[in-house]
Image: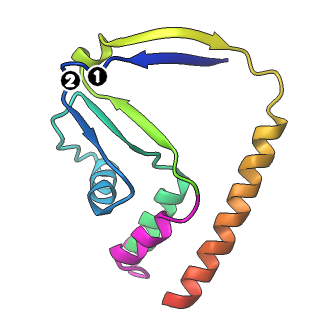
Amino acid sequence: MVNGYELDLTGLDVIRFSREADWFDYIFRNRRAEDTLAADVVIGPVANDTLYNTFGIISSGLLKPADALALLRIGPEFTQTAVKSLKALQNLTWTGAQRITDATNYRELVRKEEAEYQKLFAEYMSKVM
């Protein structure tokens, strides 16, 4: 099942990020339990498994943060919304649910995206290493 929601942003403190250094810094701090943003809602690129792998590479000293950010810009960008306050939660309305009976097409899309990312990642790393 996939649930659908609408979020009315009226009267809420909303921070929006794109795949830039401020987003990267926010996610990096957030993964260390250092969320310092006082906002009702944060909207920005999905912080997926690629991001966690990249943090590991930075921590090991193999990459500089600027190189890591360049890697994170590879591939499609999907947006996520984080509801961070009770005030924002009260502006959230459930719109319905959809039953997913066959995820074959989705799995194939993910497989292709992952293969393309790995190819571009390897190309980039060969240039900076």
Q: Residues within 10 Å of mark 1 (few under 14, many from 20)?
A: few
On whether residue 67 falls in the magenta region, the answer is: yes
Give the CA distance from mark 1 to mark 2: 5 Å
Q: Type of residue at label 1?
A: Leu
Asked if marks 1 and 2 touch (Cβ < 8 Å), the reply is yes
Q: Position of residue 71 (x, y in %)?
A: 49, 70
Q: Nearer the viewer, residue 97 or 33?
A: 97
| Quarter of the figure that contains the N terminus | top right
In screen coordinates, is 39 left or right of 73?
A: left
Residue lying at the far front in this picture: please name it.
10
User: Which residue is rendered at x = 63% and y = 73% of the image?
Assistant: 120
How many numbered circles are shown? 2
Q: Position of residue 31 (x, y in %)?
A: 35, 50
- SS class, disc 1: loop
Q: Type of residue at label 2?
A: Leu
In screen coordinates, is 124 left or right of 61?
A: right
Q: Residues within 10 Å of mark 2 (few under 14, many from 20)?
A: some
User: Which residue is rendered at x = 22% and y = 47% of the image?
Assistant: 34
* Up-down relation of residue 53 to residue 95 (above or below): below
Residue matched to label 1:
9
On whether residue 11 falls in the magenta region, the answer is: no
Residue 12 shows which numbered tag?
2
In screen coordinates, is 67 left or right of 119?
A: left
Q: Locate residue 37: give its quadrant.
A: top left
Q: Position of residue 82 (x, y in %)?
A: 36, 32
Q: Magenta stretch?
A: 59-75
Q: Position of residue 111 (x, y in %)?
A: 76, 53
User: Which residue is rendered at x = 31% and y = 54% of the image?
Assistant: 23
* Up-down relation of residue 47 to residue 86 (above or below): below
